[in-house]
Image (cartoon, grey):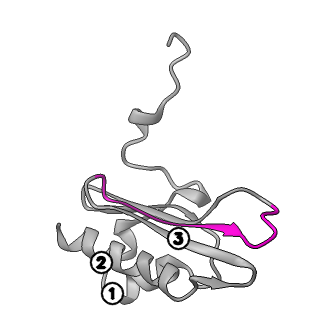
């Protein structure tokens, strides 16, 4: 695993480790080193008011970190910058910043 993916994995995992249970939630890390996608999902518990939800999701694309979702009160952006990743390498997709692999996700109405 390259260093950038390792840092993203470590930082995302901290969000799940620090909040496994609490606030009527159960938190689950989802860590995929092959695809370089790292996320934290949660479910409400014990009431199960909603289904599973994404709290945080980031992925590594080339030399960029694409943060797809971040609903935390301590942004992953700040944690990554503290770990030495320059802001220019971090894309906040959830705020509308363009992603480097957008062509892979374009809708094709003929399919």
Q: Does 58 appear above or below 103?
A: below
Q: Does 77 appear above or below 110?
A: below
Return the x and y of residue 41 as percentages of the image width and height.
Answer: 57, 65
- Assess whether residue 55 is covered by the magenta stretch: no
Q: Residue furthest front?
A: 46
Question: Of callouts 1 and 3, which one flags the residue occurring earlier in the amino acid sequence?
Answer: 3
Along the line of sight, the residue nearer the viewer: 13 or 3: 13
**Given contact means CB atoms under 8 Å apart, are the residues at marks 1 and 2 in contact?**
yes
Question: Of callouts 3 and 2, which one flags the residue occurring earlier in the amino acid sequence?
Answer: 2
**Inter-mark Cα distance, 3 to 2:** 19 Å
Disc assigned to residue 69: none
Q: Does 31 appear above or below 103?
A: below
Q: Residue furthest top?
A: 110
Circle 2 SS class: helix
Disc assigned to residue 28: 3
Q: How many marks?
A: 3
The stretch in magenta equals 35-49
How busy is the neighbourhood of tag 1: few (under 14 within 10 Å), some, or many (20 plus)? few
Along the line of sight, the residue nearer the viewer: 48 or 17: 48
Return the x and y of residue 75 as percentages of the image width and height.
Answer: 55, 79
Q: Which residue is mark 2?
A: 7
Question: Of callouts 1 and 2, which one flags the residue occurring earlier in the amino acid sequence?
Answer: 2
Disc assigned to residue 83: 1
Q: Quadrant of residue 3?
A: bottom left
């Amino acid at each position: 695993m390259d260093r950038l993916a390792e840092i993203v994995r470590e930082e995302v995992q901290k969000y799940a480790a620090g909040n496994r249970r609490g606030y009527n939630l159960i938190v689950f890390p989802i860590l995929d080193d092959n695809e370089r996608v790292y996320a934290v999902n949660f479910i409400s518990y014990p009431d199960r008011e909603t289904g599973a939800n994404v709290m945080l999701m980031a992925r590594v694309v080339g030399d960029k970190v694409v943060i797809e979702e971040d609903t935390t009160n301590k942004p992953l952006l700040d944690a990554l910058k503290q770990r030495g990743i320059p802001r220019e390498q971090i894309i906040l997709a959830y705020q509308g910043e363009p992603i480097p692999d957008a062509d892979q996700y374009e809708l094709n109405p003929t399919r």
